[in-house]
C-alpha cells in the first residue's frame, strides 16, 4: 500500500492513473464519501504493491532496478522516462512490484515458497478466485514488503446483539476481543453485562475473548472503590471467585484488569492484588493482563499515574496494554488525541523497565470536534475518523497535518458561524503508529475502541503486519 496526499487541483482519476490502479479500488478501500470531492491535504490509501523511491545522488536506474528486483524498462515505462541516463536527486520514481509469469506445472504454493510470501497474501493481492486453477502465461504481482507478526486486541463497549456485526467486520485483524467492562462492586461482586453475543462473535472469527474488569465509570473516578477492594483480602477473594465463575460460564480465556485513578498510597496494595490475581489465573489455566496509564517516568505523580507500577506489572502480567491516547481529552482544550511524540516518551520509559514482548501499543480510533474558543467545562464531540472526513468534505475545508504529533486536523465554520477544530486519525497517522510499533519491537496493538469506522487503519494494519491468531 502507498499513501497519497491530495494536492491542489488533483482529481481522483489523475491519481489513479499515476499509480496505475482502478479508480473504484481507491474509492472502495478508502470508503470515500464523495469521490468527486477530494480535499487538499486528504490522505488516500493506494492499493498497490508498487513503491515510491526518492532518487539519491549517484543513483542509476540499473542500480535501482537491481535493488527492487525489477527491470530498467519497467521503471522507465511506469514513470514515462525516455532517457535512462537522466534521473536527478530528489526525483520520486514509481517502482513496479516484481511480476512473475506462471509456467506450466506451477502451483500458487510453489510460487509463494519461491518468493517467500504467504499463500494467502499472494491470493489476495492478485484477486484469485480459485487458487487451484491458474493458467500458464498469467502475470502475478509478487508482494515485496516483509511483515512482522504481532498480536492485536480490540476493546468494545457495545453490548448485546449490536456488538456481533462490529466484531465480525474486523475479526480477521484481531487476536483478542475484550468487552469493556465488568464494573466491580464494593462487596466483590460484578455488575452484569450482556457480552454473550460478543463472545460468540469472537469465537466465530477465531479471536480470543478476554474478560475486562474496571473500577470506574464515566461519572465516578473509582479511587475509593479501588481502595475498598485492594485493602480487604476477603473482598478480593470474593472478587476473584466471581471472576472465575463468569470466565467459565461465558467462555473467556483471559483477564484484563483496568483499575484507574488508584490512590497513590495504594500502589503496593495494587501490586499485591495483581500478583494474587495472576497466581489464581495461572492455576486455572488463564492468562492475565492489565491496562496502564501513559507514564514517562517512575516518579510521575498524579492520581492516574503513581499507583501504576510499570516494573511490577511488566514482571507479573502476561502482557500490559499502555493506554497511549487521550492527550486530546474530551473535556480539555483541542489537541492531538494520540501525539506520536508523547507516545514515544511513554515507550522510552516502558521498555526500560518491562519486556518489549509484553507491551501492547494503545491506539485510539476516534476523532474529536471542539468548538472554539475553548471554554473550560465544555465537552468535545467524539465520532469516527470516517465521520471526520465526511464532515470535512461537507464543509469544504483543507486537511492540515502536524508533523510533530503526526496527527491530521482541520477547522471549519458551522451553520451558526461557530469555529470548530477537529483532530482525527488518517492513513499517515496510522502508518506512523505502525512504524513506531515496529521500531520498538512491541508485542502488539490494542484498539480503543471497536465500532468507530476507520477503513484505512485496517488495510494498513494488514499491509504492515501478520496478525497472530491463537485459535
Image: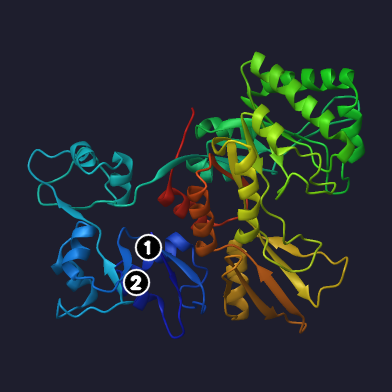
From the viewer's side, name the closer residue of 227 and 55: 55
Which residue is identified by label 2? Answer: 16
Occupied quadrant, residue 62: bottom left
Q: Is residue 206 left or right of residue 195?
A: left
Q: Where is 134 relative to 229, above or below? A: below
The x and y percentages for residue 248 are 67, 18
From the viewer's side, name the closer residue of 179 and 237: 237
Find the distance from the CA under tag 1 to the CA under tag 2. Answer: 9 Å
The x and y percentages for residue 358 are 58, 35
Q: Where is 89 relative to 232, above or below? A: below
Question: Which of the two labelled residues, at mark 1 and mark 2, occupies the earlier sequence position?
Answer: 2
Occupied quadrant, residue 261: top right
Q: Secondary structure at mark 1?
A: helix
**From this viewpoint, is residue 384 visible?**
no
Given this view, does label 1 or label 2 mark the residue nearer the observer?
2
Occupied quadrant, residue 76: bottom left
Which residue is identified by label 1? Answer: 25
Q: Secondary structure at mark 2?
A: helix
* Picture residue at 9% right of the left edge, 38% below the top: 105
* Picture residue at 49% right of the left edge, 58% below the top: 431
Q: Is residue 245 left or right of residue 427?
A: right
Res 203 label:
none
The x and y percentages for residue 1 are 38, 59
The x and y percentages for residue 182 are 77, 33
Dot 1: few (<14), some (14–19), or many (≥20) neighbours within 10 Å? some
From the viewer's side, name the closer residue of 357 and 166: 357
**From this viewpoint, is residue 111 visible?**
yes
Q: Do labels 1 and 2 touch, CB within 8 Å?
A: yes
Amino acid at each position: 500500500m502507498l499513501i497519497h496526499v491530495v494536492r491542489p487541483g488533483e482529481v481522483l482519476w489523475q491519481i489513479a492513473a499515476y499509480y496505475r490502479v482502478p479508480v473504484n479500488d481507491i474509492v472502495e478501500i478508502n470508503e470515500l464519501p464523495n469521490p468527486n470531492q477530494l480535499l487538499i491535504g486528504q490522505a488516500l490509501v493506494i492499493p498497490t504493491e508498487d513503491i515510491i523511491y526518492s532518487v539519491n545522488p549517484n543513483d542509476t536506474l540499473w542500480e535501482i532496478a537491481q535493488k527492487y528486483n525489477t527491470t530498467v524498462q519497467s521503471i522507465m515505462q511506469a514513470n514515462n522516462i525516455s532517457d535512462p541516463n537522466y534521473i536527478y536527486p530528489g526525483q520520486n520514481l514509481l517502482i513496479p512490484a516484481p511480476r512473475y509469469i506462471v509456467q506450466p506445472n506451477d502451483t500458487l504454493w510453489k510460487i509463494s515458497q519461491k518468493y517467500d510470501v504467504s499463500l494467502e497474501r499472494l491470493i489476495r493481492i492478485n484477486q484469485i478466485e480459485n487458487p487451484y486453477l491458474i493458467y500458464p502465461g498469467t502475470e502475478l504481482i509478487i508482494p515485496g514488503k516483509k511483515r512482522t507478526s504481532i498480536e492485536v486486541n480490540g476493546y468494545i463497549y457495545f453490548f448485546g446483539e449490536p456488538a456481533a456485526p462490529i466484531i465480525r467486520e474486523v475479526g480477521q485483524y484481531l487476536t483478542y476481543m475484550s468487552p469493556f467492562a465488568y464494573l466491580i462492586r464494593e462487596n466483590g461482586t460484578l455488575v452484569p453485562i450482556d457480552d454473550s453475543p460478543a463472545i460468540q462473535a469472537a469465537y466465530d472469527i477465531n479471536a480470543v475473548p478476554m474478560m475486562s474488569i474496571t473500577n470506574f465509570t464515566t461519572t465516578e473516578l473509582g479511587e475509593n472503590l479501588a481502595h475498598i477492594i485492594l485493602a480487604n483480602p476477603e473482598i478480593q477473594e470474593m472478587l476473584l471467585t466471581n471472576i472465575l465463575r463468569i470466565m467459565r460460564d461465558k467462555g473467556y480465556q483471559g483477564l484484563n484488569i483496568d483499575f484507574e485513578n488508584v490512590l497513590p498510597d495504594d500502589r503496593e496494595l495494587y501490586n499485591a492484588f495483581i500478583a494474587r490475581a495472576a497466581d489464581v489465573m495461572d492455576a486455572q489455566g488463564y492468562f492475565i493482563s492489565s491496562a496502564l496509564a501513559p507514564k514517562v517516568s517512575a516518579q510521575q505523580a498524579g492520581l492516574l499515574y503513581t499507583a501504576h507500577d510499570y516494573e511490577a506489572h511488566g514482571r507479573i502480567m502476561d502482557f500490559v496494554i499502555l493506554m497511549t491516547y487521550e492527550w486530546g481529552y474530551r473535556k480539555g482544550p483541542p489537541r492531538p488525541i494520540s501525539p506520536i511524540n508523547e507516545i514515544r516518551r511513554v515507550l522510552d520509559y516502558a521498555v526500560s523497565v518491562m519486556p518489549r514482548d509484553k507491551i501492547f501499543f494503545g491506539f485510539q480510533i476516534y476523532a474529536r470536534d471542539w468548538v472554539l474558543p475553548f471554554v473550560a467545562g465544555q465537552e468535545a464531540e467524539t465520532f469516527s475518523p470516517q465521520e471526520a472526513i465526511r464532515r470535512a468534505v461537507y464543509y469544504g475545508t483543507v486537511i492540515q497535518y502536524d508533523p510533530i504529533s503526526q496527527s491530521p486536523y482541520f477547522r471549519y465554520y458551522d451553520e451558526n458561524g461557530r469555529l470548530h477544530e477537529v483532530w482525527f486519525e488518517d492513513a499517515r497517522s496510522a502508518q506512523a503508529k505502525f512504524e513506531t510499533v515496529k521500531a520498538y519491537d512491541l508485542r502488539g496493538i490494542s484498539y480503543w475502541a471497536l465500532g468507530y469506522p476507520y477503513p484505512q487503519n485496517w488495510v494498513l494494519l494488514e499491509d504492515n503486519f501478520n496478525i497472530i491468531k491463537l485459535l
